[in-house]
Image (cartoon, helix red, strand yellow):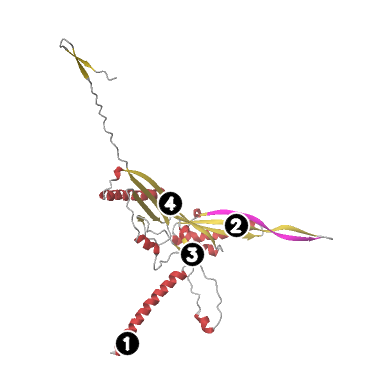
Amino acid sequence: MKNYALSILLILLCILTTNAQHKGNYDQLSRQNILHSGNATIYNPTVQQQINKILNPSTTVFIDVKALQNVKATTYTAIFNVSQIGPTADSTNLLINQRISKIKNQLKTIGITEDDFAIDVISFVPNYEIEIQKKLFSKTYTEIPNGFELQQNLHIQFTKTSQFETVLTACAKSEIYNLVKVDYYIEDMAEIYKNLQAKLLKLIEEKKVYYKTLGFDLVNYNVAIADDQYCYFPKDFYQSYQAFNSVSFEAIKKRKGITTVKKQTSYYYQPLSYENYDVVINPSILEPVVQIGMNIRLQYTPKPKEVKSKPVVKTEIKHKYYVVSPNGTLDIKALQTN
């Protein structure tokens, strides 16, 4: 019986230890490895305050509606910086054209044509070296050109993100490694804003019905409005972090010093969170997208009650007096009051 009780106790201790270990690893990853926001913490005071927030009733009615749409880019443009040096201006220009032509030929296989390339010349300058001329009693130092440097930005347009890997490989084969940026372009931006507007107007009408059910007929209110629209591209939402563990158990066992190395900084795409939006179109995304949003805020204040003026009744009394003559006749005359 004692052995059975001891076995149960050991099993419980193992379970508790395992649970504590899991929680400890999670906490360590959340608090130490991640340098920027992104990982959820075990306890979030801001969320707790939102849950326990006290609502203050008011006669003023606010309708805040927000909509967000995730849109895949219609086209992408990758920009590479290309630098070439040569002994003469003609040879330098020839060398860089050969490198770019090699890229164009390789990318034709995936549907990127000549029209999808553009070249932006940044600089074309000579390089100088010092020539020393010795004379009988002096030396002369003269700068003379010994070559030329041509620098260009190569713009490559493509329509699918799957083509980008091929673009990178083709540029690397021509010794072009400096990727400056990738731009995203969208057609029919006005149509997207129109779609968001229609969604928000429908939501506003639903909220008006809701408030009317509660006894607030917004027809009897004055309204003020503010609206906003915006567009964010993926380049605005990349964050960095470092995930590593610097503890070396092997160094401790061998009693040797630890030589620190450079820790790699990683980046990840962190789009806008959906928690503050009433409408989200295309919420599930696999790749970085353009995020287009619209906000509308309406403020309804009760109309002042009309005060009806009471009609003024003017009472006019006409006074008369009677005159009796000695012979007994009666004469009636009006009394003048002014």
Examine the image and state in which quarter residue 90 appears.
bottom right
Q: Identify the mark at residue 230; answer none if there is no mark.
A: 4
Of the residues shown, which amino acid type is indicated by label 3? Ser
Q: CA distance from mark 4 to mark 1?
A: 66 Å
Q: CA distance from mark 2 to mark 1?
A: 78 Å
Q: CA distance from mark 3 to mark 4?
A: 24 Å
Residue under the image location 53 percent in, 84 percent down:
254
Question: Horizontally, is 315 left or right of 108 in the view?
Answer: left
Span shown in magenta: 118-134
For disc 1, the marked residue is 6
Q: Is residue 131 magenta?
A: yes
Count neighbours of disc 1 (C-alpha within 10 A) and say few if under 14, some if 14 to 19, many if 20 or more: few
* Number of on-image labels: 4
For disc 3, the marked residue is 240
Q: Identify the mark at residue 151; answer none if there is no mark.
A: 2
Is residue 186 something that shows in the picture?
no
Q: Secondary structure at mark 2?
A: strand
Count neighbours of disc 4 (C-alpha within 10 A) and say few if under 14, some if 14 to 19, many if 20 or more: few
Predominant SS along the magenta part: strand
Q: Secondary structure at mark 1?
A: helix
Q: Earlier in the sequence, mark 4 or mark 2?
A: 2
Question: Horizontally, is 183 left or right of 71 in the view?
Answer: right
Instruction: Establish if 117 lies above or below 8.
Output: above
Front-most of residues 151 and 212: 212
Front-most of residues 212 and 142: 212
Q: Earlier in the sequence, mark 1 or mark 3?
A: 1
